[in-house]
Amino acid sequence: MSLDFKPGAFDFFRDETFRESFTYRNSNPLRFPFPFDRDDYMYSVNMEPHVPGRKGTAFEHILDVDEHYVAEMIDRAKVLADDPLRCQSLPHMTLAGWDLLELIMEAKARDYPQWFSLTKNGNRWHWVNRPLGIEQSFTFLDESTLPYGPFEYITRQTQGDFSLQDERDNDLWMDAGMITSQADWSLDFDIGMSFMEWHAPVPLAHEKGVFDRALKFLLKLQHGAPVRRFNWTMTVNPLLDTAPETYPKWGPTKTTLTQENLGAKQHLRVELQSLYRLPRSNAIAFDIRCYLCSFEQIVTVPKWARRLHRVVRDLPDELAAYKGFLRNRPAMVEWLSKYDDGAPTSPGWWPDD
Amino acid sequence: MLTPVTPTIRSRPVYAPLEPRPGRLHLMVADGEGADALIELLAKANNRSEILSSAHVIYAPGPNGTDRSDVLKALGLRQFFRAPTIPALLPRLVRVLADAHMGTQFYLAGTEGLIGQAEREIMATGFPMGAIQKEHRGSTVRRVQCVHCKGITENVATDPFKCSHCGLNLFVRDHYSRRIAAFQGVNIDAEDPGQVPEPVVRFK
Ligand code: HEM
């Protein structure tokens, strides 16, 4: 599968880059899933049912396909060409890969019929992905009929990183992943770990019991009742692939911020994470969908501007250090303070209310 | 005495003194001062002769040169094997595991590098974690994987250190992968190239 952007073929999808020239932009910042529902932030078990939400937002469909789709898939293909270890699946995870393929194909064909279609004739399936120019007939559950394993096949066509968790011994084990737009953690290092092991580096949350409660909650997750939560961090430049593997390449960009370029270069990085129990394998799929928005676009929404300033200013040092922006926090706060007049903000994350 | 490990983060392995357990085969893998843990284990066993007659010890000298082969050999074990190094020990372990049945008790003692690599081989054959006991003894040098080039540097004593494969200066995290049997090393001067703090001996 070789992906080339064909201008004009789909005017909806932006021809843009997440590297070198960094031409990524949001045509409509109001679509951005701003993650703060109040003026401060601390870790919590922030999970809610993952049900379709407001029209015209990232929540409209359970798998959001937006204007960045084609460009993100091209970026993913480049990451994988440079480092195939970013996609791995332990041998016992193949069935879970089929479960995920089914979930994604059905959701996309249902919610975006103009772009995707799925026709089934018993186990003979026919999949069409028009934006990426892919057409594939295959036999469901027969790996030899696809160009990649089912997990890699479908996640090369789906925005968001994905990991698959096997459930054993009352624990979850991260036994497969397609991880190319991660906030600085290594699939290759973490694959095979348990829930507490892969979360080990997170500060404060273990002590607060957040992970004990989160794991208990997830072990009860039911098929057909997905849940979601937000996570967020900061990234200089709209760089999707902030991997530890390549940290020596992108780390130095953190030292390039000035008050003049900060608004354009500094991005709030939001992960809209959703979790699905899979029907055949009983595994849990974890979708980590990354949205980027530059500070200068965020501050076009007055409520978000005020709130981001307060959250960044008051975040505990441990979290700013863990998220990798301790050194740039003073500069961010200085820049953001110009957009905070001290007025109260309304509860909730929507821009308008 | 058990080498004390300060619990830090939840992926960092912790250890406990070896306890005698009933079993059909007692497979003991040790390096360096780990030999003392085996000797103490036998000393507190009330079925010492039973364990001895079904014990297989696979041993290598420690990274600091400690070699207690003679003491172990004199114990009267059913089977004893000395390898010159850990890499030389592992093929033997893999072969022995191929014949080990359920009901085998595993005792791992010595450096974290030895324990981690032996544990990885045992788990790969499908034995439950509950059958494996681990006691850290002797040197605290670490086996560290460079997250950038994926090369593993053995016997890391200082923090930071230079990756023996790609040459980057790495700091040593407590984040530990059992699959790789190594701690993680991350470039310390990525954001400010050339600004490498003086290495400090953290692991002896
Ligand atoms: C089973 C699905 C999940 C997977 C695969 C997963 C994976 C991860 C990974 C790899 C990290 C980065 C750790 C590092 O620094 O190396 C992380 C961070 C984190 N996870 Fe999860 N996680 C899952 C579910 C959850 C849930 C349900 C919660 C709910 C409380 C949660 C809370 C967090 C928090 C608070 C962080 C720190 C994020 C930050 O400050 O940037 N995770 N997770």
Image (tube, coloured by chain):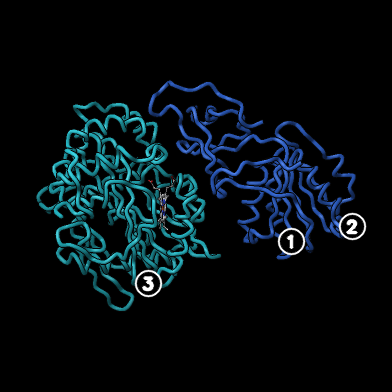
Q: Amino acid at mark 3?
A: His
Please provide percent x and percent y for residue A144. 39, 64
Write down the chain letter for disc 1: B
Q: Please tell me how crowded label 2 is: few (under 14), some (14-19), or many (20+) other residues with Cα within 10 Å.
A: few
Please provide percent x and percent y for residue B68. 82, 38
Is residue A322 rendered to the left or right of residue B179? left
Identify the element where label 1 is drawn: strand
* Colour cyan maps to chain: A
Q: Which residue is mark 2?
A: B49
Task: State which tag comes first along the sequence, 2 or 1.
Answer: 2
Tags 2 and 1 touching, CB below 8 Å: no
Residue depicted at x 31% and y 74%: A124
Name the residue nearer the viewer: B105 or A353. A353
Question: Image quadrant for the C terminus of chain A?
Answer: bottom left
Q: Are marks 2 and 1 on the same chain?
A: yes
Q: Which residue is mark 3?
A: A223
Q: CA distance from mark 2 to mark 3?
A: 54 Å
Q: Amino acid at mark 2?
A: Ser
Please tell me whether mark 2 or mark 3 is closer to you in this view. 3
Please provide percent x and percent y for residue A207. 49, 50
